[in-house]
């Protein structure tokens, strides 16, 4: 750690160092009302309970404050010696009970609405991965993709990154490369599961927060009533990059939705076509570097140096003396806590990142791995 | 006691409840600073958007160890320290019922704490974060990915042994060693709350031990309790954990209720209002604590019927809790109050614990919890009940009994200064976190979107001041131990109870002949 880095940390600790240009007025004090009927119900219920608590608080605190001001020895107060009263005690046990019943009735209605996922129009399977989301449209053949933290946010969130990147990034930490798109006024059913550890899919405006559990499928649903872009985050600690797997939902008109389905499905099919091509080493290195940054650098480090439980790739036997087949196998199938990347990357991406790892940071094997080899290794 | 060992041997071999109580309290104080230092790292990283201080894994390790150390290292041992010092003094017993076990249950703790934090310093790059980084709730399967899990598991086992032995000791002492004439319903409320807490501990620590043992066999011996691929269920872990975890939060707060129930009558110069209903409310809270655990897990996808049940049962806790707050208020009502430092902390406890209670009620309403769950709203809630609740009661208790323990009065001016700095800063620290949570900031994230910047910065400023003000507390305690105005036996004008009838400082051995309670 360099001296200047330490100075900078100290400056941060002392509050002397300020991220320039962050003047923010759009903070919120209260829960969002959201864009679904249920989110509105939840908001109303929140307001109800909050006001009940506020009024109860004002009443109790007023009595206490009155007492603190008036019943003090310095004012000559003489202590009364009463210490029980059955009447009073029964009254203040019963009143909270009645208030609780008043809260429980609307809460029950709303809860039952939340748990009713029947009669849906669109079904999307959401799979949590460390640390990204996978979306599969169950009604559309071949429409499945991964959604990662947007590239500009990912660069800005690195330790010690230039602070000006924070404001340059679009919606810092709340933007993704591939948002999901849903039609407005249609009931969207979510099937939620996980590939590795627990995650929770949460978009406040939709009032959906549901854990994704490996080996189990949870259900939830929403009916968005307003078009627009809505953002959320993973809400269950899922390891190192838990804070960096946002969710973006685009709610659009039905026509726009249909067009998106068409173009997205075509794009996925086109990308798969790269499996049959042959690339030059330079092309593979360039593509591989991008894939590495997006999918590998979070654990293995920007310079392949590793960190904590994640082994370095620089000089690692797998990426140097080991065979290409072994290397491909680790990437495709995963190893230990490393998730399988086979489902996330197409053959060309796997080939490119393998080529990159075998040649970058002085690994220098000179190997060129083509998509055909990746395809064969699956 | 001329043949009593001196120096280090006195502390290693002591079976004296006062020595052991002091060791518990000092241990807890050290842990408070260790856990507090970790909180400072957390707040420094969250001071501004962007990553400036530590990497995400290190940050997760800080939140994990901060939680574990504060719960198991600071709050619980402090309460046991109070029990050791005060229970025999308050019931007129010469010592704890099982003094050698008492020694053992303390001396396990430093080793357990060492085992918990040691992995931080093992192997490789310290700044990469080698310690546990899966949250204090150590949910599977994330915790199962940790390569030094065995250290964590054995640390939890040791902490459990210590707690269970401590609890057995407290129950045995209270049930068998009360002075003649002290019936159960004449016991000071602090003794009552600890009796109930001790039963809670004995009931739930083995459940925690079961949970970590299942983790151990899953990780190292090929079982699949929490792994769906082998026929297990990750959610089972959460059910088992919270069956321990929910009573655990009452384990931390019930003795705090007891301390506050001792202090308020003393400085209001008026008997505690509704003593019997306080005892019943404590027992009711303890009972309810066993049947509400899944309100921590509303989002895991339980059936609607399960969610409804856990919601109804949870909001019921508001009733006995409200009774307690009303009783404290009624105790102050028409009293003749003075505001020495312990009273200030106790009053602040009542106000701020109530705020934490309100947010607890809000969190219990299941449909709304879908929005609150795992956000800073939850962080604000449990810090209001644990910091301005449990910790405030601990600090109040230290000021209250310190003159009895040391024979000297603490510096009243500094005590009040400590109170005001802490109370202002702690609200600057935690109140804005409600807004952050409502606005959508998840907990346990090392960095955040820009709209959360203002309140995070405010919260961090509060944290730095609150952290620093506890150094003043340390100074006040050391100053008091070294000297100061001599305390009378009764210490406080209207203090009532057996502990105020022995000299100040309390002699090494008290109540060799049991006092008579009328």
Image: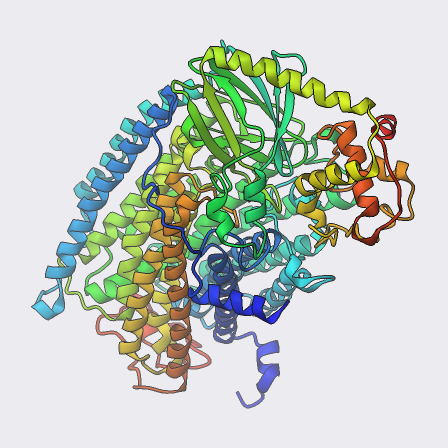
Image: B369 above or below A85: above
Q: Residue at x 50, y 18 (%)?
A: A182
Q: Is residue B379 left or right of residue B107?
A: left
Q: Is residue B163 left or right of residue B310?
A: right
The reply to whether residue B188 is in sight is no
The reply to whether residue B339 is in sight is yes
The residue lying toward the viewer, choosing from B428 and B188, is: B428
The residue lying toward the viewer, choosing from B101 and B317, is: B317
Colouring of the image? rainbow
Q: Residue at x 61, y 77 (%)?
A: B12
Q: Residue at x 37, y 39 (%)?
A: B438
Image: A191 above or below B5: above
The residue lying toward the viewer, choosing from B204 and A108, is: A108
The residue lying toward the viewer, choosing from A245 and B32, is: A245
> Number of labelled discs?
0
Q: Residue at x 79, y 48 (%)?
A: A360
**Whole-percent x and y of residue A179?**
54, 27
Residue B412, picture quadrant: bottom left
**As drawn, which residue projects farthest toward the bottom?**
B2
Quarter of the figure that contains the C terminus of chain B: bottom left
Image: B393 above or below A254: below
**Whole-percent x and y of residue B437?**
40, 42
**Whole-percent x and y of residue A229?**
45, 27
**Whole-percent x and y of residue A325?**
89, 36
């Amino acid at each position: 750690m360099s001296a200047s880095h330490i100075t900078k940390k100290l400056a941060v600790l002392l509050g002397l160092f300020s991220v320039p240009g962050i003047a923010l007025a759009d903070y919120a004090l209260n829960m969002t009302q959201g864009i679904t009927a249920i989110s509105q119900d939840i908001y109303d219920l929140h307001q109800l309970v909050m006001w009940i608590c506020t009024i109860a608080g004002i009443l109790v605190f007023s009595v206490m404050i009155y007492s603190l001001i008036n019943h003090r020895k310095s004012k000559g107060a003489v202590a009364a010696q009463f210490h029980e009263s059955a009447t009073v005690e029964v009254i203040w046990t019963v009143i909270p009970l009645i208030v609780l019943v008043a809260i429980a009735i609307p809460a029950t209605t709303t809860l039952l609405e939340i748990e009713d996922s029947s009669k849906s129009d669109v079904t999307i399977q959401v799979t949590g991965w460390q640390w990204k989301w996978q979306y599969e449209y169950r009604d559309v053949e071949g429409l499945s993709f991964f959604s990662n933290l947007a590239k500009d946010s990912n660069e800005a969130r690195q330790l010690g990154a230039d602070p000006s990147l924070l404001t340059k990034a679009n919606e810092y930490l709340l933007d993704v490369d591939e948002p999901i798109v849903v039609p407005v006024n249609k009931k969207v059913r979510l099937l939620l599961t996980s590939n590795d550890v627990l995650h929770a899919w949460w978009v406040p405006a939709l009032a959906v927060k549901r854990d994704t559990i490996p080996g189990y499928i949870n259900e939830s649903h929403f009916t968005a009533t307003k078009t627009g872009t809505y953002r959320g985050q993973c809400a269950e600690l899922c390891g190192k990059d838990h804070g960096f797997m946002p969710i973006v939902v685009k709610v659009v008109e039905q026509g726009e939705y249909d067009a998106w389905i068409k173009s997205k499905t075509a794009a996925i099919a086109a990308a798969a076509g790269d499996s049959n091509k042959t690339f030059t080493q330079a092309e593979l290195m360039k593509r591989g570097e991008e894939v590495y940054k997006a999918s590998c650098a979070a654990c293995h480090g920007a310079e392949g140096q590793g960190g904590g439980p994640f082994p370095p790739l620089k000089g690692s036997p797998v990426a140097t003396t080991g065979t290409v087949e072994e290397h491909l196998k680790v990437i495709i199938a995963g190893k230990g806590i490393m998730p399988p990347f086979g489902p996330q990357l197409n053959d060309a991406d796997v080939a490119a990142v393998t080529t990159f790892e075998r040649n970058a940071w002085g690994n220098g094997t000179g190997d060129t791995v083509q998509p055909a080899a990746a395809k064969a290794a699956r | 006691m001329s043949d009593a060992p001196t120096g280090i041997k006195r502390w290693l071999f002591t079976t004296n409840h006062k020595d052991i109580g002091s060791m518990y309290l000092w241990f807890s104080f050290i842990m408070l600073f260790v856990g507090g230092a970790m909180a400072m790292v957390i707040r420094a990283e969250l001071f501004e958007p962007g990553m400036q201080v530590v990497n995400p894994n290190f940050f997760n390790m800080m939140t994990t160890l901060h939680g574990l150390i504060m719960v198991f290292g600071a709050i619980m041992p402090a309460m046991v320290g109070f029990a050791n010092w005060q229970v025999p003094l308050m019931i007129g017993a010469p010592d704890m019922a099982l003094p050698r076990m008492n020694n053992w249950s303390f001396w396990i703790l430093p080793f357990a704490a060492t085992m918990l934090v040691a992995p931080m310093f093992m192997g490789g790059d310290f700044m990469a974060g080698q310690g546990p980084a899966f949250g204090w709730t150590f949910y599977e399967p994330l915790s199962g990915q940790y390569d030094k899990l065995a250290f964590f598991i054995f640390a939890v086992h040791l902490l459990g042994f210590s707690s269970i032995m401590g609890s057995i000791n407290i129950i045995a002492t209270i049930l068998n060693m009360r002075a003649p004439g002290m019936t159960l319903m004449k016991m000071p409320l602090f003794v009552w709350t600890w009796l109930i807490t001790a039963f809670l501990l004995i009931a739930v620590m083995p459940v925690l031990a079961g949970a970590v043992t299942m983790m151990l066999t899953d990780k190292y011996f090929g079982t699949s309790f929490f792994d769906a691929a082998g026929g297990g269920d990750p959610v089972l872990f959460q059910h088992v954990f919270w069956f321990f975890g929910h009573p655990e939060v009452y384990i931390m707060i019930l003795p705090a209720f007891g301390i506050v129930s001792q202090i308020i009558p003393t400085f209001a110069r008026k008997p505690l209002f509704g003593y019997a209903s306080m005892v019943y409310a404590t027992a009711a809270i303890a009972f309810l604590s066993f049947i509400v655990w899944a309100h921590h897990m509303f989002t895991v996808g339980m059936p609607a019927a399960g969610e409804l049940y856990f919601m109804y049962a949870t909001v019921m806790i508001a009733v006995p809790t409200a009774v307690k707050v009303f009783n404290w208020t009624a105790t102050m009502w028409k009293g003749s109050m003075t505001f020495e430092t312990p009273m200030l902390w106790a009053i602040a406890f009542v106000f701020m614990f109530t705020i934490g209670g309100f947010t607890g009620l809000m969190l219990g309403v299941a449909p709304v919890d879908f929005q609150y769950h795992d956000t800073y709203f939850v962080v604000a809630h449990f810090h209001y009940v644990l910091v301005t609740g449990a910790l405030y009661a601990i600090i109040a208790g230290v000021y209250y009994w310190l003159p009895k323990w040391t024979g000297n009065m603490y510096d009243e001016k500094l005590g009040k200064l400590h109170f005001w700095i802490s109370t202002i800063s702690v609200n600057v620290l935690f109140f804005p976190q409600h807004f952050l949570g409502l606005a959508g900031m998840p907990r346990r994230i090392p960095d955040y979107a820009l709209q959360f910047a203002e309140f995070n910065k405010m919260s961090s400023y509060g944290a730095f001041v609150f952290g620093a003000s506890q150094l003043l507390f340390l100074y006040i305690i050391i100053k008091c131990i070294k000297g100061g105005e001599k305390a009378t036996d009764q210490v406080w004008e209207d203090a009532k109870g057996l502990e105020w009838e022995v000299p100040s400082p309390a002699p090494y051995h008290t109540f060799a002949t049991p006092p008579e309670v009328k």
